[in-house]
Image (cartoon, rainbow, N blue to C red):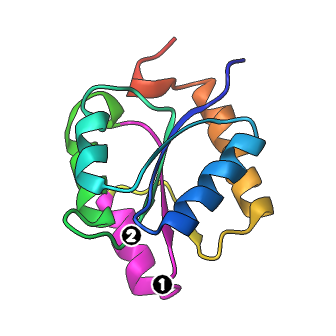
Amino acid sequence: MPPLKTLVVEDDPVALELISQTLTLLGAEVTAKSDSVEAQRLLNTIAFDAVFLDLEMPQLGGLELTQSIRRNGINRKSPIVVVTSHKDSQHMDQAFKSGATFVLYKPIDREKLRKVLAMLSNQSKVTPAGGASR
């Protein structure tokens, strides 16, 4: 099975590098973006098996980007993993109401990321990028 095609959207360069490197080491194909508006444009043209995005970003926040992904186009059924340092239930509820599939807390734990990636890999066997069925 080919590697999961993932998009990581994170405005903090250290966190972006950490998440991207960890996903790559776990076998994913990673596209990394630090600009959420640029990521939104990319999401309109390329299908991804999973999207990892920060909750708080300038210009277009993670909740807005999640809602945009769910409303439009080829990634509307792709799993979305929200990454945040907010560990309260209000932020988690908002993420899920916006369309998030999973929520991971910063700092990212490699083992938790591995488990999420494994779940996404199993899910992609059923629903490939873009939501089309095989």
x, y (%) of residue 27? 74, 35
Relative to 19, say whether 127 is above or below: above
x, y (%) of residue 57? 32, 69
Residue at the farthest top position: 134
Query: Which quadrant, please, contains the N terminus?
Result: top right
Residue bearing mark 1:
86
Residue at the farthest right position: 111
Residue at position x 35%, y 55% from top? Answer: 99
Based on the picture, tell me whether residue 87 belongs to the magenta stretch.
yes
Residue at position x 19%, y 66% from top? Answer: 59
What residue range appears in magenta?
Answer: 77-98
Q: Nearer the viewer, residue 123 or 54?
A: 54
Residues at marks 1 and 2 touching, judged by CB atoms closer than 8 Å? yes
x, y (%) of residue 132? 41, 18
Residue bearing mark 2:
55
Tag 1 secondary structure: loop
Q: Quadrant of residue 95?
A: bottom left
Count residues near mark 2 (Cα–Cα under 10 Å), then give few for <14, some for 14-19, many for 20+: many
Tag 2 secondary structure: loop
Relative to 29, say whether 94 is above or below: below
Residue at position x 67%, y 26% from top? Answer: 3
Count of marks placed on residues: 2
Residue at position x 51%, y 33% from top? Answer: 49
Q: Earlier in the sequence, mark 1 or mark 2?
A: 2
Q: Amino acid at mark 2?
A: Leu
Q: Nearer the viewer, residue 35 or 69?
A: 35
Q: Amino acid at mark 1?
A: His
